Image (cartoon, helix red, strand yellow):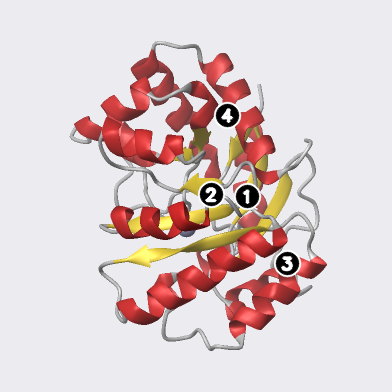
Amino acid sequence: MKLFDSHCHLDFDAFASDRKDVVARALNVGVRAIFVPGVSRRQSLSNSSSDNQWPDDCAGVALLQGFGLHPYFIHQHQDDDLQWLAQQLESNPTAAVGEIGLDACCEDYTTQTRLFTAQVDLACEFQRPVVIHHRKTQPELLRVLKQARSKLPENPGVIHAFSGSKEQANTWIELGFMLGVGGTITYERANKTRTALAQAPLSNILLETDSPDMPISGYQGQRNEPAHCIDVVRTLAELREESVEELAAATWNNACRLFGWHG
Ligand SMILES: [Zn+2]
């Protein structure tokens, strides 16, 4: 059984001291591929440097990469970061655009919107999927993405850490998007999201942990890590009354299709 963690910030400092062990524990439960989003120019630079940040040996776990300007770091981003992003996409033919998005709890919503729209344009130009961050912003995100839909690639992207109703899920699915499923579903109080994901088409679901954030139920306050992918898929299997193996295989294939990767 192979698991694909489609959203894990393995490059963050939270993993600086034991990244190799984290990857080994993930491998141990079946994780064979991890998508590491980019959040800013600075973070992405440290990501690709050879300063020993990365385990020498990720044997057995493929690392896929994205580049993006995340709303959390809105004050760091400069206008020429968009040119930098275009260069990264040019020189990394398989890289996705993300993590990008809109966050109602972050400042400077006008700049957020301008940067988000410009990054969606780059995704269209380079024909890459987008990895979308949202917080109380789904209608605005959908408005921009619907306008760009005819120019985005066939598999246009994923709404990372999807939460919401069945109707909201359907709107994303109609646009061709995947729903990123993480720790949220392990909380019983997340009724609406659990129902939506129990009924969503299998072809539109990705597993993710969002490590080091979004701890699963029972691990609140602790650092999350990609090995918890197994808990997410087990909870999803219960909710959907499908087998863990079937879900692992389907979500693996969905992630490969989205990222254009043939693992
Ligand atoms: Zn993220």
Is residue 48 left or right of 249 when viewed as pictured?
right
Residue ID at (60%, 63%):
11
Q: Dots 2 and 1: beta carbons under 8 Å?
A: yes
Residue behind mark 3: 89
Q: Name the amino acid, label 1.
A: Phe
Q: State which mark lies toward you, 3 or 4.
A: 3
Q: Dots 3 and 2: beta carbons under 8 Å?
A: no
Q: How many numbered marks have been drawn onto this rendered protein structure?
A: 4
Q: Secondary structure at mark 4?
A: helix
Q: Name the amino acid, label 2.
A: His
Q: Earlier in the sequence, mark 3 or mark 2?
A: 2
Residue 7, labelled with which disc?
2
Q: Position of residue 212 (x, y in %)?
A: 46, 55
Residue 220, labelled with which disc?
none
Q: Secondary structure at mark 1?
A: strand
The Cα–Cα distance between marks 3 and 4, rounded to whole angstroms, is 25 Å
Q: Is residue 7 above or below residue 183?
A: below
Q: Secondary structure at mark 3?
A: helix
Residue nearest the viewer, comparing 121 with 6: 121
Q: Position of residue 81 (x, y in %)?
A: 60, 83
The Cα–Cα distance between marks 3 and 2, rounded to whole angstroms, is 19 Å
Q: Position of residue 260 (x, y in %)?
A: 73, 43
Q: Dots 2 and 4: beta carbons under 8 Å?
A: no
The Cα–Cα distance between marks 3 and 1, rounded to whole angstroms, is 16 Å
Q: Position of residue 210 (x, y in %)?
A: 47, 50
The Cα–Cα distance between marks 1 and 4, rounded to whole angstroms, is 13 Å
Q: Earlier in the sequence, mark 2 or mark 4?
A: 2
Residue behind mark 4: 251
Residue 35, labelled with which disc?
1
Q: Secondary structure at mark 2?
A: loop
Q: Is residue 166 visible?
A: yes
Q: Name the amino acid, label 3.
A: Leu
